Amino acid sequence: MAKSRFEYVRDFEIQDVLLPQCYIVVRIDGKKFHEFSKYYQFAKPNDERALKLMNACAKNVVRKYRTDIVLAYGESDEYSFVLRKDTSLFNRRKDKIATLFVSLFTSNYVLLWAKFFPGVELHAKHLPFFDSRCVLYPNLQTVKDYVSWRYVDTHINNLYNTAFWMLIQVCNMTPRESEQKLSGTVSSEKQEILFKECGINYNNEPEMYKKGTLITNKGEMKHIDVIKHLEELFHGN
Ligand code: ATP
Ligand code: ATP
Ligand code: MG
Ligand code: MG
Ligand code: MG
Ligand code: MG
């Protein structure tokens, strides 16, 4: 095909190619989901439907790029996809990977919404959308530490959110009182407050809330202590 005289503008496009031999992590995160969850009246601290919807979307992404993915891990409104260090997906073009993952995830979220939120209609002014980034990890240790970081984050956030909301829902505290009560407390103290004030044993909370969700490249979904299983999860990678 003949080239037009305008064709030169293509040279203005730069392609970021991700370094070879590094693990690529794509992390997507819901835009303003604090507001989104309020609008659609998510149960607090954890709406099970919303978490299951996130998991279903992630599972479909994993299914599509199964051979390039080591694992996916998600909590709240975020999901991380860990790609093999030798993947040649989209010739390792950063923009392609970040945008195609997040748009595939988002289209699934909209498509599957009705299945997980039957009777709740998405409103044009409150549509779900997500940001996305690619991060490179240069060796096995750093990528394992990345997954551990998100796992620990799940625990810290969920313990805080559970205590915060139970003080409100069970003990009739105001949000401000609940926040003050928890201010400066360490994990064990939050668990004690939950137990003594609200009669809730944190250990008995659902595994999905406490541990987040892991999806293996075989498509299996698990709620496990990922730090304990890193060795087998990255075996051969
Ligand atoms: P940003 O656009 O900067 O990401 P955000 O409002 O999405 O802002 P996050 O730090 O990503 O902030 O936090 C996501 C918020 O979404 C949580 O704090 C929580 O309020 C809400 N949320 C997400 N998933 C759930 C869920 N399954 N159940 C209840 N609330 C949820
Ligand atoms: P890539 O994933 O590399 O973008 P592609 O198949 O999407 O591959 P494009 O160069 O983006 O390739 O071209 C889009 C193709 O989609 C067109 O060549 C055409 O076949 C089809 N297409 C897009 N929009 C329409 C339309 N409105 N009507 C008919 N065909 C369309
Ligand atoms: Mg964010
Ligand atoms: Mg968010
Ligand atoms: Mg988030
Ligand atoms: Mg195209």
Image (tube, rainbow, N blue to C red):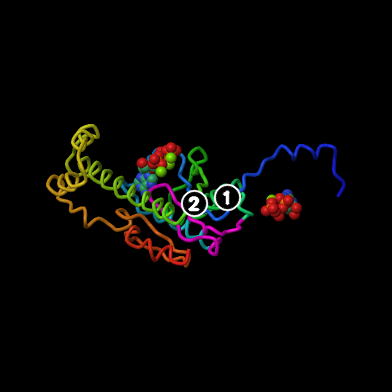
Residue shown at the point (32%, 47%) measured from the top left? 43
Amino acid under disc 1: Leu
Give the class, few, some or many, for how many residues have Cα within 10 Å of label 1's Cα (few <14, many ≥20): some
User: In the image, is residue 93 part of the stretch drawn in magenta?
Assistant: no
The tag earlier along the polypeptide, 2 or 1, is: 1
Tell me the crowding category of disc 2: few under 14, some 14 to 19, or many 20 or more residues within 10 angstroms, Cα based.
Answer: some
Q: Is mark 1 on a helix, strand or loop?
A: loop
Q: Which amino acid does label 2 sit on?
A: Pro
Looking at the image, which residue sits at the far right?
2
Please report the residue visible at 45 percent of the width from the left and 44 percent of the height from the top: 30
Image mark for residue 42 = none
- Is 94 situated left or right of 170 in this image? right
Q: Does the residue labelled 2 lie within 8 Å of ligand 3?
A: no
- Depth check: give the residue in front, 67 or 160: 67
Q: Where is residue 114 in the image (x, y as percent from the top left)?
A: 47, 54
SS label for mark 2: loop
Q: How far apart are marks 2 and 1 (CA)?
A: 9 Å
- Indicate the quadrant where residue 52 lies: bottom left
Residue indicated by mark 1: 19
Asked if residue 2 shows in the view, the reply is yes
Q: Mark 2 points at which residue?
A: 138
The magenta-colored residue range is 64-89
Q: Position of residue 224 (x, y in %)?
A: 33, 61
Q: Can residue 41 be seen in this view?
A: no
In the image, residue 151 sits, relative to residue 178, either above or below, namely: below
Q: In this view, does 85 lie above or below 33?
A: below
